[in-house]
Image (cartoon, rainbow, N blue to C red):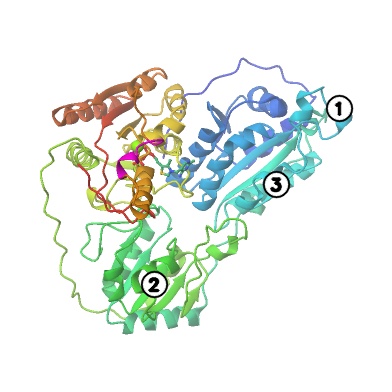
Amino acid sequence: MASEIVRDVPSPVRETREHWGSDAIAAMLRALDVPYLALNPGASYRGLHDSIVNYLGNERPQMLLCLHEESAVAIAHGYAKATGRMMGVVLHSNVGLMHGTMAIFNAWCDRMPMLILGATGPWDASRRRPWIDWIHTASDQGALVRDYTKWDNQPASVTAAYEALLRAAQMANTPPRGPTYINLDAALQEAKIGELPPLPDVSRYQPPAAVQPDAAAIRRAAELLSAAKNPALLIGRVSRSVEAWRARVALAEKIQARVFTDIKAPCAFPTDHPLHAAPPATFPDGKLLRDCDVIASLDWIDTAGTLKAAWGDAPLTAKVIRISADAYVHRGWSADYQGLPPSDVYLMCEPDVAVPLLLEAVRGRPAAVQPRAEPKQEADTAVSIRALARTFNELTQGMDVCLAKLPLGWHGAYRHFRHPLDYLGADGGGGVGAGPGLTVGAALALNGTKRMVVGIMGDGDFLMGNTALWTATHYKLPCLFLVANNRSFYNDEMHQERVAKERGRPVENKWIGQRIDEPDIDIAMMARAQGAIGIGPVRELAELKPAIERAIGEVKKGAVCVVDVRVLPGYDAPVAGTGASATRR
Ligand SMILES: Cc1ncc(C[n+]2csc(CCOP(=O)(O)OP(=O)(O)O)c2C)c(N)n1
Ligand SMILES: [Mg+2]
C-alpha cells in the first residue's frame, strides 16, 4: 500500500450549523472514498474548493495542486493504471475542461476509471457576475467530453448531486471502466442549505459483481484451444492482479500456447517466459501468428488489425476466440474500438474472469516449445535509447521498478517484465504530453512502497507535460524521469521522410518543422526550476552510467530526478504508420 503523502494543512475552522451545497458534495466524495482530487483552481468551483479545505480539512479527498489541467487528468490516469482505483479531478468551468480534454481522451481509450468534476457559472443567469461568469458558463458543457466519457450529468440539487456522484463512481468502476464527468452549478455549490441532507449508504451502490461468461461458450472455447495444433494468446488489457497474472501463465503452459503482448498495454505476461513468442510490440509479428490455428484474444486492443497484418487479404485460417467486454463502451464518435474482429466464440467478459474458467476446462498437453534464445547483443558505440535501456537495466538489476512510460523509440526487447507492475503501458489515446503526468500519478500510487517509479520518455512528450513535475516535488513523490532527448518530434521526421520518398522529393528536408534545437532546450534546468534534481545533458556514452546511477541514488533518497539523455535520432522498432524500421546512427 502507498503511504500518506505531504498535505497542506488548513488552520482550524470553527464548527457552524450552517452548511453550503458544496459541503454536502464534499461529504459525498469522502463517503465514496475518493482519495485525491487533482486540480487547478477556478472560481466556478470556489464553493467546492472551500468545502474541501475548510469543511473536510483537505483530507479524504486531499487536493493535489497541478500546474495544468492536462497534468491533473494524466496524474489521475497514472494513479488508476497502477492501482486500478479511481481518483478525482476537478476542472474549472469550460476553459479548465478544455485544457483537460486530451488527457481525458487518453484515459478513455485506456479504459481507466476517473471521477471528473467540473463546474459552470451560475446556471441561473440573474445570479451571474458580469462578464466572467458569462464567458465561463456554457450550455451543455458535458458535450465537450461526452464522446469520450462513460456518463455525464449536471445535477440541479444537493440530493440529485448525491445520486449523480454515486452513479458516476459506480459507472466509472464498472467494466469496461472509464472517466465520468459531473458538472456542478456554482449556484448549487454556494447555496446555503442548513443541515446536510443524510448521505446515502454508499455500500449499496457498489459496481456489480464481475459478469460471468456462458458455460457452454467456455466449453466451446476450451474445446477449440484443447484441439488446436498451435494455439496463441493475444494478451491485451488485463488487471494488475498477481493472481490473474499467474492464471494466465498457467493457462498458456497447460495448452502450450504462444503468447503475444502489446507494448501499448500494461505488461500482462512474463516476457522472458519460453512461451512469450516475441518482444511486446505495437504490431506483433504477423509471420509468427500466421502459423497459429486457434487465437484467443484477451481484450487485445486491435484484434482485427492484428489478424489483418498477419493474413493480409488471404482467408483467415485460424479460429478466433474473442474475450472482451469492451464493446459495451463502443460509440460512434471515436474509432478507438478498432476494426470488427471475426469470432468463432465470443465471451463478453473480462479476461481476468474467463482465464481461470478456461484453465479449468482445457485439456493439458506436454511442453513442446523450446526456450527462446535471447538476441545477440552488439556493443553500443553511441548514446541511443538502446544504450540508455541497457545502462538502466544494469543499474536496476534486482530492484523493483515500475515503468510508467516508455518512449516511442523503445523496442520491446530492451527490458523484460516479470510482474504486473513492471510496466504500465502507453498513454491510451496516443496524445503526446501524457508521460510526465502518468509518471507522477504512478509515483503517487506507489509512494512509500519499495518499487521505484520511472518514466522514460521522448523530449517532445516531456516538454509538453513537464510541469507535472512540480506536483511531484511539492508533494514529495519520488520518481525518476529519463528523457530520451533526440531534440526532435522524430516520429514525424520519419513520416516526412516517407512522404518525400514517395514523392521523389529531398529527404534531407525532413527535419524542418520537427527539430527542437537552436536553441537546445535545457531539460535539466527545467527540472531544477521546479525543485527537482536535473542531471545532464548527457552527451557521451561514458557519462551515461554515472548519470543514471546518481539519479537512482537521488530517487532512493526521496527526490524527483530528471536526466536529459541526448540520444541519437533513430529507432530500433518499426514506427506506427510510417512503414519505417529505421536505425539511423
Ligand atoms: C497531442 C499530440 N500532438 C501531436 C502528436 C503527433 N506526434 C506523434 S509522435 C510525435 C513526436 C513525439 O516526440 P517525442 O516524444 O520527442 O518522441 P520522438 O518522436 O522524438 O521519438 C508527435 C508530435 C500527437 N500524437 N499528440
Ligand atoms: Mg523526440
Alpha-carbon distance for marks 3 and 1? 23 Å
Residue type at mark 1: give it.
Answer: Arg
Q: Residue furthest right?
A: 126
Q: Which amino acid does label 2 sit on?
A: Ala
- Residue 559 in view of the camera: no
**Which is nearer the N-term, disc 3 or disc 2?**
3
Query: Which residue is rendered at x = 37% and y = 22% of the image?
Result: 527
Above-or-below relation of 543 to 253 = above
Q: Name the residue under label 3.
A: 143
Q: Does the magenta stretch include residue 15?
A: no
Q: Quadrant of residue 132?
A: top right
Q: Is residue 9 left or right of residue 446?
A: right
Assign a secondary structure to mark 3.
Answer: helix
530 and 13: which is toward the camera: 530
Which residue matches tag 2? Answer: 296
- From the image, which quarter does the C terminus lie in? top left
Q: Residue at x 36, y 82 (%)?
A: 317
Q: Position of residue 241 (x, y in %)?
A: 40, 54
Q: How crowded is mark 1: few (under 14 residues within 10 Å), some or many (20 or more)?
A: few
State the separation of the CA atoms marked 3 and 2.
37 Å
| Secondary structure character of the magenta stretch overall | loop
Instruction: Answer with left or right where residue 439 lies relative to residue 161.
Output: left
SS category of the residue bearing label 1: helix
Whole-percent x, y for residue 210 in the image = 53, 63
Residue for badge 1:
127
Magenta stretch contains residue 510: yes
Q: Give the range drawn in magenta.
A: 507-514
Identify the element where label 2 is drawn.
strand
